Image: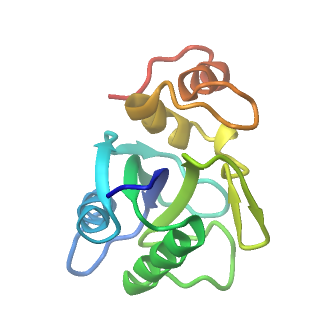
Amino acid sequence: MTRHTYLVALGSNQRHPQLGSPREVVAAMMDLLDETLGDVLARSPIIETAPVGPSQRRYANATLVLGSRLEPLGLLDCLQEAEAAMGRERRGQRWRSRVIDLDIVLWSGGVVAMPQLAIPHPLFRARDFVLGPAAAIARDWRDPLTGLSLGQLYARLTGNRPVPR
């Protein structure tokens, strides 16, 4: 039984020794989340994007809609455990290269404002690498703070550029 629905963003810009390229890492993580944390209800295309911050490597990015029994903090803990299992370290430089990055972007319950978790994700409205894939699978999902749909937010950010397929 699904009690909550989440929009989760995935990104990778480092190879994994067993899984391969960043694109393969993102695809494998989508499968893993579907098998362990709930039901993946929709998957976006995996797109390649320029890095944010000091990293020089291009990213593979995607989003998914996850139905889960987990409460937001429980899901955050599980996502961080999955990142750590893939070799992600959460100390040091922000925005550095990483095997996997998993972020809760939106939640069907609305807003979470805690020191360890903010939903909606505070930066998602300015990131076309999140909004493009998100609009491809959940165009009508509304941001609880602005009231705008993901499709509207993407159009505003990109000047009506087509959603990635």
The image shows residue 103, relative to residue 135, as above or below, that is below
Quarter of the image where one finds residue 164: top left
User: In this rendering, would 128 be left or right of 35?
Assistant: right
The image shows residue 113, relative to residue 77, as above or below, that is above
Q: Quadrant of the N terminus?
A: bottom left
Q: Nearer the viewer, residue 57 or 31?
A: 31
Q: Nearer the viewer, residue 14 or 28?
A: 28
Report the number of discs: 0
Residue 128 in the image: state x and y as whole percent: 57, 36
Residue 14 in view here: yes
Residue 58 in view here: no
Q: Residue at x 26, y 68 (%)?
A: 32
User: In this rendering, would 55 be left or right of 53?
Assistant: left
Quarter of the image where one finds residue 143: top right
The image shows residue 121, relative to residue 93, as above or below, that is above
**Which color scheme is applied?**
rainbow
The image shows residue 118, relative to residue 164, as above or below, that is below
Q: Residue at x 48, y 53 (%)?
A: 9
Q: Residue at x 69, y 39 (%)?
A: 126
Residue 3 in the image: state x and y as whole percent: 43, 55
Q: Quadrant of the C terminus?
A: top left
Quarter of the image where one finds residue 160: top right
Residue 104 in the image: state x and y as whole percent: 55, 57
User: In this rendering, would 159 be left or right of 62?
Assistant: right
